[in-house]
Amino acid sequence: MAERQHGRVGRVVVAVGVLAGVCFGAVGCSGSGAALDADARAGDPVETLHRAADTLVDAGSSKARTSMEMATGGTRVTIRGHGVYDYRRRLGRLKVMLPQDPAGTSRHRPITELLAPGALFMKNRGAGVPADKWVRVDTATLTDGNLVTGGATDPFAAAEVLRGTRTATYVGKTEVAGAAVRHYRGVADLRRAAHEASAGNKGPLAAAAKGFATARVPFDVYLDDEGRIRKIRHRFSFLNGQREGTVAVASTTLLYDFGIAADVRLPATGDIYTGRIAEE
């Protein structure tokens, strides 16, 4: 269960029953290669990115697609998700698709996740949890603040990481899913992000700042003409509890269809499982 994840990187994604015992490896990330231009709207990149989360709140809601890439040895694993997010209420719903085994099949059903300030709810968790029950995890108790544990990064938390931007450069214009965007590359500090974040993300981001190998998070982000995040990619680094050195996970979030209805309702108390969860 999630409380057993503290201090062991190889068990980070056990909260969704995904990769127990796997040692994560570094996953690369490349930029768009767009040339620098004289776009007057780019402004100061650091200040622009500090405002990105607030711009999502102004947008109200969106659909989201997520992917989390991990590798060990010659095997690469990608966990994908899709759903909706209400930035004003800080509530989201994702369906997380677990990776297939080498034979091309999956032993797991998709996991439904509800994202809320300070909490992660999971359904179809497995590990002895009844199919009609939810598991609740306090994200401030996770060493990664749920930036990785759920197999998908909370879209608003991903945006709030940018509040900690220390350095950033404007790379140039490009397109994401047919939308014209401006590409920025930089490094955020999770400690500063936690200090500047909304109340629900202060605790989780502070936990991540302590739990990761470094509080520095390299990122690439793509903003549309209204300043809304269309794509953001983080590289998170962990101390490896099983071998020497650090390991890395690349998390990508795509946002689109802004303003869509996002009716997210949290489980009733009676629907939350309180029994013992088997270790997978």
Image (cartoon, rainbow, N blue to C red):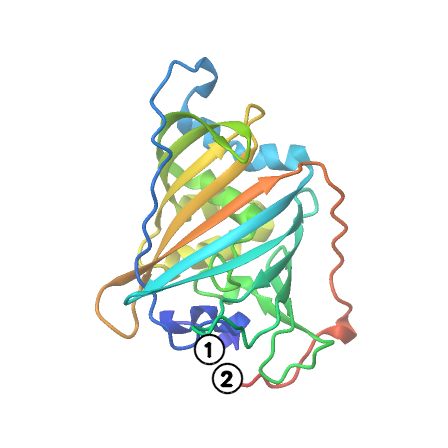
Q: Name which of mark 2 and mark 1 comes first in the sequence.
A: 1
Residue at point 59% right, 52% down?
200
The residue nearer to you, when weighing 10 against 30, is 30
How busy is the neighbourhood of tag 1: few (under 14 within 10 Å), some, or many (20 plus)? few
Q: Position of residue 229 (x, y in %)?
A: 54, 36
What amino acid is labelled 1 in the image? Arg
Q: Going 46% across and 77% down the picture, which residue do you hit?
A: 4
Q: Which residue is mark 2?
A: 279
State whether residue 102 is above or below residue 54.
Answer: below
Disc 2 crowd, CA 10 A, few/some/many (<14, 14-19, 20+): few
All told, the count of numbered labels is 2
Rendering quarter of residue 87: top right
Q: Position of residue 34 (x, y in %)?
A: 36, 27
Is residue 17 depicted above or below 38 in this figure? below
User: Outermost residue toward the front?
Assistant: 103
Pointer 1 residue: 4
Seen in the picture, residue 169 relative to 29 is either above or below; the reply is above
**Residue kind at label 2, given as amino acid type:** Glu
Q: Residue at x 54, y 73 (%)?
A: 106
